[in-house]
Amino acid sequence: MTSATRLFMLNDANQLLRLPTARYLRMVRDAPANPLIGLASRRVRCAEAVVELVSRKPVRVTRMMFWTVDFDDRGILDTKSLGLQCVAALDALLSKLWPGPQTVNVVEASARFVANGGGWQPTPAQRLQIRRAALRQIDCATLDRNGLAPTVRHGASARPAAHATEPGRLRAV
């Protein structure tokens, strides 16, 4: 039994778009060399689903996370704000697990505010759609190198999207 990570973004019309994990990792490691021009000057809602695999087939989603990412005017991922969100989320989690002594009646909540500023809460319908797409039970368009969604994934095959009006235009949050 193994697991896999599935990454998604939501566009202006709440259409779920798959972002290949390898592409996302390249964007994080070397953002200037891997821009998504179609996402220039936008804040985008993202979702991650960790999927349990049995014989290389998805059987269940074990965890889902939701956050936002920012892109500059050239479509380059803002890795600095993403890093701050990650560190703040970890700090908030660690302070819950190992609370320090409180000598004053003031709560230090800055890490939680930074971490929550990078998050979003999906509706139950969006959560279900993400879960079903992660399990490959429904078709999901895949973002291309420009931040558009020209193909629809179904299982292991891909075909051109026939329903795209303005595919991949992602929502500013």
Image: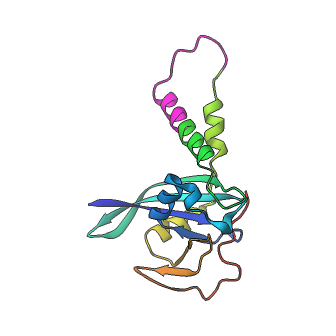
Quadrant, the C terminus: bottom right
Q: Position of residue 80 (x, y in %)?
A: 60, 44
Q: Residue at x 64, y 12 (%)?
A: 104
Q: Quadrant of residue 115?
A: top right
Which region is colored magenta?
90-106
The extreme top residue here reads: 103
Q: Is residue 1 magenta?
A: no
How many circles with numbers are drawn on the protein? 0
Q: Report the colour scheme.
A: rainbow
Given residues 45 and 59, the one toward you in this image is 45
Given residues 27 and 64, the one toward you in this image is 27
Q: Is residue 95 magenta?
A: yes
Q: Residue at x 70, y 83 (%)?
A: 165
Given residues 156 and 21, the one toward you in this image is 21
Q: Position of residue 171 (x, y in %)?
A: 71, 64
Q: Position of residue 118 (x, y in %)?
A: 63, 47
Q: Residue at x 63, y 44 (%)?
A: 81
Q: Quadrant of residue 106?
A: top right
Q: Position of residue 46 (x, y in %)?
A: 59, 58
Q: Is residue 79 above or below residue 158?
A: above
Q: Residue at x 46, y 25 (%)?
A: 98
Quadrant, the N terminus: bottom left
Q: Is residue 157 above or below residue 55?
A: below
Given residues 151 and 33, the one toward you in this image is 33
In the rendered structure, the answer to whether residue 53 lies left or right of residue 117 reads left
The extreme front residue here reads: 33
Q: Quadrant of residue 87?
A: top right
